[in-house]
Image (cartoon, rainbow, N blue to C red):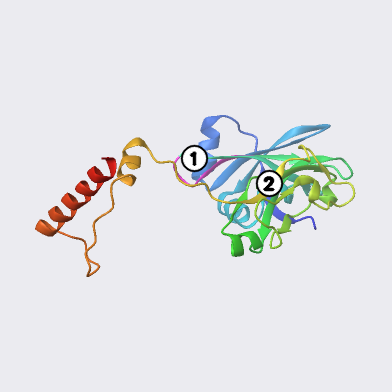
Amino acid sequence: MTTTVANLEALPRDDTGKGAARQLRRDGRVPAVVYGKDMETVMVSVDALAAQHLFQSISVDNTIIHLGVEGDAEAHQTLVREIQTHPYKNDLIHIDFLRIQEGVMVDVDIPIYLEGTPEGVKSSGGVLDQIINELPVRCIPSKIPESFVIDVSALEVYEAIHVYDLELEEGVEVTIDEDRTICSVTIPKAPVLDEEEAEEEAEEPELIGEDGEPLEGEELEEAEAAAEAADDDAEG
């Protein structure tokens, strides 16, 4: 498990308000803020295309972004804490960056990927169900895992992998109940029929002739009459 790092450039901004933000977006930039412990909030903007390209190529929740702000001696080590997007366009509206400090614990969500086909799926008709897709952890920035990859190929039907089954690097703490199930292999349940479907299922089967084809017309009427007579004799 390794920490993923990316780079992004930013420009400082002084103007605030909706009008200034709209003008930035018209100019192809996205307003953003950088905040963190023991620091004043810094207002910046980033190139919209560069930010979109970056966010599409990384795991946003747990990638450290070196945010280089023009005029600052060093880049800020940050995590993306919020991305606001247009309600029906694929446009970035605003970004919040959290500045992190070396050695100070942070909370991040790490994606979970399942690898392999469970034995219970291949040989017993089971279905693999992934319940948790991201695992919330707390650790120092240098130990942020890129992802958790779990081999599920040995899972049989009714077996599961839980949070406590994961091997975590020292200093990485899970912040949810370790008894939680990450994934399991189950047998699919039979569909529940409604009343109309149940009646259709309960309909009498077609009468088949000696040639293997369903009876029709007079042959069907004669066969049904014979069947009713046989039922009457049995009841008598």
Name the residue at 9% across, 57% down.
218
Q: Which mark is residue 86?
A: 1
Neighbour class for label 2 at 10 Å: few (<14), some, many (≥20)?
Answer: some
Q: Which residue was labeled with disc 2?
A: 134
Tally of marks = 2
Q: Amino acid at mark 2?
A: Glu
Q: CA distance from mark 1 to mark 2?
A: 25 Å
Q: Quadrant of the N terminus?
A: bottom right
Q: Which quadrant holds residue 80?
A: top right
Q: Amino acid at mark 1?
A: His
Residue 227 percent across, percent down from the top left: 22, 51
* Whether residue 69 is visible: no
* Whether residue 62 is visible: yes
Instruction: Please tell me which residue lies in front, 170 or 100.
Output: 170
Q: Is residue 72 left or right of residue 47?
A: right
Bounds of the magenta segment: 88-95
Q: Is residue 10 left or right of residue 125?
A: right
